[in-house]
Image (tube, rainbow, N blue to C red):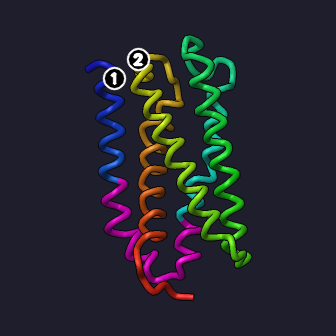
């Protein structure tokens, strides 16, 4: 089997399995907590996005990948990681602007993820040597996607959350 179909099969399988885990195990636990605690837990999934900076480390991925793609992916992830961490502090400190900040952060992170997916498709990224970064795309990115969707659901869903 070729790299490209394996890549997409792994991403889709990860997304499916992680969605099952989220629906069957994570969500039932989250609804027992306060809204701010649930958001904090899900935001922590985005904090390690600083790992995207690995794309800029010489020799880590194929040098033939366009520099613009690598810079956008790396810095987009770094900004999301920093914003997620700020949101966690805001939620835990009870800032009045915490929820609007979560909206901005989650929207940024989700759009950054979609932009990265666009780049992956346009450049046929799995045809390049990704070395260990392959796992970031095939496991961590689907995990981030599921967390973004769950955060949006919490922000949108009218529910009386515990205080």
Q: In this view, does 89 lie above or below 126?
A: below
**Disc number placed over residue 142 in the picture, else none:** none
Residue segment shown in magenta = 18-41
- Residue 150 covered by magenta stretch: no
Q: Residues within 10 Å of mark 2 (few under 14, many from 20)?
A: some
Q: Nearer the viewer, residue 8 or 78?
A: 78
The residue at the point 59 percent across, 60 percent down is 44
Provide residue 107's location: percent of width, then percent of height. Answer: 53, 53
Provide residue 26's location: percent of width, then percent of height. Answer: 41, 68
**Does 145 sit left or right of 5 as displayed?**
right
**Does 41 sit left or right of 98 as displayed?**
left
Secondary element at tag 2: helix
Split into 4 quadrants, where in the image is the N terminus?
A: top left
Quickly name the residue at label 1. 4
Quickly name the residue at label 2. 127
Location of residue 79 by image quarter: top right
- First in residue order: circle 2 vs circle 1: 1
Secondary element at tag 1: helix
- Report if the CB atoms under discs 2 and 1 are less than 8 Å apart: yes
Provide residue 129's location: percent of width, then percent of height. Answer: 49, 18
The residue at the point 44 percent across, 19 percent down is 123
């Amino acid at each position: 089997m070729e790299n490209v179909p394996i890549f997409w099969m792994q991403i889709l399988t990860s997304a499916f399995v992680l969605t099952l885990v989220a629906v069957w195990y994570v969500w039932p636990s989250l609804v027992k907590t306060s809204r701010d605690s649930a958001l904090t837990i899900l935001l922590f999934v985005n904090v390690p996005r600083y790992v995207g900076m690995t794309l800029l480390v010489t020799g880590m991925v194929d040098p033939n990948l366009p520099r613009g793609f690598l810079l956008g992916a790396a810095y987009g992830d770094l900004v999301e990681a920093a914003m997620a961490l700020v949101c966690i502090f805001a939620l835990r400190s009870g800032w009045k602007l915490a929820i609007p900040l979560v909206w901005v952060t989650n929207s940024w992170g989700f759009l950054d993820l979609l932009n990265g997916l666009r780049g992956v498709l346009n450049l046929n990224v799995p045809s390049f040597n990704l070395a260990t970064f392959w796992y970031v795309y095939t496991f961590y990115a689907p995990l981030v996607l599921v967390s973004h969707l769950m955060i949006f659901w919490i922000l949108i869903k009218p529910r009386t959350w515990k205080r």
